[in-house]
Amino acid sequence: MAAESSRAPQRAREIMAGASAVTALTGAGISTASGIPDFRGPQGVWTNNPAAARMFDIEAYLADPDLRAQAWRSRSEHPAWRARPNDGHRALVDLERQGRLRALVTQNIDELHQSAGSGLQAPVLEVHGSLKRAVCLSCGWRGTMEAVLARVAAGEADPPCEVCGGILKSDTVSFGQSLDRQLLRESARAAAECDVLLAVGTSLQVNPVAGLVPLAHEAGAEVVIVNAEPTPFDAIAGAVVRGQIEQVLPELVAA
């Protein structure tokens, strides 16, 4: 086991060196070095405060004005507003500039991939949405989160939609909401058409996104997993690499 573990980074570099069409799947772990905590890790948001998960439950959010007010305060204070991309994000930009990135599927809502420069040649598929957009749950209005947070700062604890008076939230997918079907189709196509599926900083515990890994594997792609903790799909991966993502990922892309 120790020998196999020591070979993992080298095997990952070999796989990446031979890749011409990579689909990257990223989770919260790629953004922790930018100051954004993950959810399920040892210092994760839900690990340290299990009650915080209630803000991400759509039924609770709709039913409880006090919870919505708490959620708006949390959005105002979210570290994503201060965060900057790290070398892990920039490594995926380099992979895109090399012409080897098929698509970047991200579970993150912080838009740090776009801030780093991703999305000019290969699509960034935000399957869980973005914190930086707001949406009305009644009429479907969409706008910038900054505009709504300005109303919160001015004293509106739970700002209603200015078009229809409905309930606003971040344009992100909460528990109890469905993911965008078109985004899922595009993500599945990218997984099925790549020669390497690179999963970075994701626990791979949440479906249907986690299902992209076995989908790629069954289509003949190599799987490379870069994550601090074990995942359910380590056994089918061609290489599993532990370590700091902002250090490991640039090395793999440079290969």
Image (cartoon, rainbow, N blue to C red):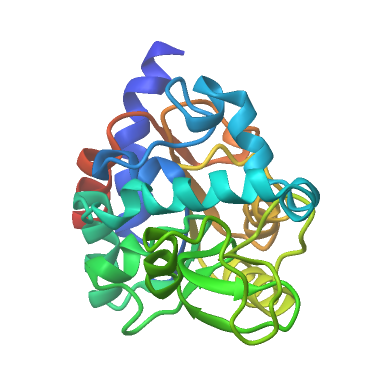
Where residue 159 appears, as percent x and y from the top left, is 56, 66
What residue is rendered at 70% in x and 52% in y? Answer: 211
What residue is rendered at 69% in x and 58% in y? Answer: 215
What residue is rendered at 62% in x and 84% in y? Answer: 141
Q: How many marks?
A: 0
Residue situated in front as seen by the camera: 186 or 80: 80
Where residue 115 appears, as percent x and y from the top left, is 26, 68
| Residue 29 in sight here | yes
Where residue 3 appears, as percent x and y from the top left, is 37, 16
Furthest residue to the top?
2
What residue is rendered at 23% in x and 53% in y? Answer: 82
- Residue 153 to residue 141: above or below: above
| 23 sits to left or right of 76 | right
- Residue 10 to residue 189: above or below: above
**Image quadrant where residue 150 sits:** bottom left
- Residue 33 to residue 145: above or below: above
- Residue 17 to residue 180: above or below: above
Residue situated in front as seen by the camera: 248 or 66: 66
**Image quadrant where residue 111 sits:** bottom left
| Residue 27 in sight here | no
**Image quadrant where residue 67 sits:** top right
Q: Locate the C terminus and report the quarter of the image it occupies.
A: bottom left
Where residue 52 appears, as percent x and y from the top left, is 59, 33
Furthest residue to the front?
155
